[in-house]
Image (cartoon, grey):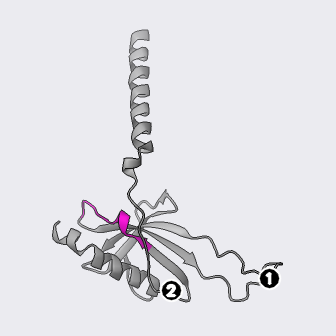
Amino acid sequence: MRRLLATLCTVLCAGLSAALLLLASPAWAGPVDWHEVAQGPEGRQWWDAGSLRINRDGNLTVLSRFQPAPPADQPLNRDGSEPRPPASDLYVMEIDCGQDLFRDTSINGIPQWGSSWQVVRGDGLIEATIKAVCAAGADLLAGS
């Protein structure tokens, strides 16, 4: 029994060590290449060309960032300077370019299991983002 436990601990420790080394490796991180789409009254939106991939379902995935517009009545700081802009949120989007559908598979690093497909209508920032991402990913989609 002791021998089994010792072997199990060794295997688990080796596996965890290998996983940590792989996760900490800079080879996993691609270059960040943010592209901003036209700013709208809702705020600002960017997508990262360095994260553009095609998934096993043949759809594009991309990291995007949204920063809401500051409130119109937001006062200046005490020293008269502009206040800090609102914090932005990070999304991993899955995009079906053929049907103009998208879903957020991760928001601020939290997986969105079972997220629903949404139609791309009525949100200018999302529409512009998806149009730009689908144009940039055309070669990836053609090769799938």
Reply yes or no: does residue 35 show up in magenta.
Answer: no
Residue in the picture at 42% in, 72% down: 47
Name the residue: 73% across, 84% down: 74
Within 10 angstroms of label 1, few (less than 14), some, or many (20 or more) residues?
few
Badge 2: how crowded within 10 Å, few (<14), some, or many (20+)?
Answer: some
Q: Does residue 49 belong to the magenta stretch? A: yes
Q: Which residue is mark 1?
A: 80
| Along the line of sight, the residue nearer the viewer: 102 or 108 | 108
Label disc, if present, on residue 39 of the rendered structure: 2
Could you tell me how far apart the alpha carbons at marks 2 and 1 are, in whole angstroms? 25 Å
Range covered by the magenta-colored residues: 47-57
> Counting residues from the N terminus, which is met first, the one under dot 2 or under dot 1?
2
Q: Nearer the viewer, residue 12 or 26?
A: 26
Q: Is residue 143 above or below residue 133?
A: above
Residue 117 visible in the shown view: no
Residue 87: x and y in percent read 62, 70
Amino acid type assigned to the residue bearing label 1 in the image: Gly
**Nearer to us in this view, 136 or 126:** 136
Residue farthest toward the right in the current orientation of the protein: 78
**What percent of the width, then of the height, locates residue 4?**
39, 14
- Above or below, comparing residue 99 to residue 64 in the picture: below
Rendered location of residue 34, percent (x, y): 44, 71
Q: In the shown orientation, is residue 58 left or right of residue 39?
A: left
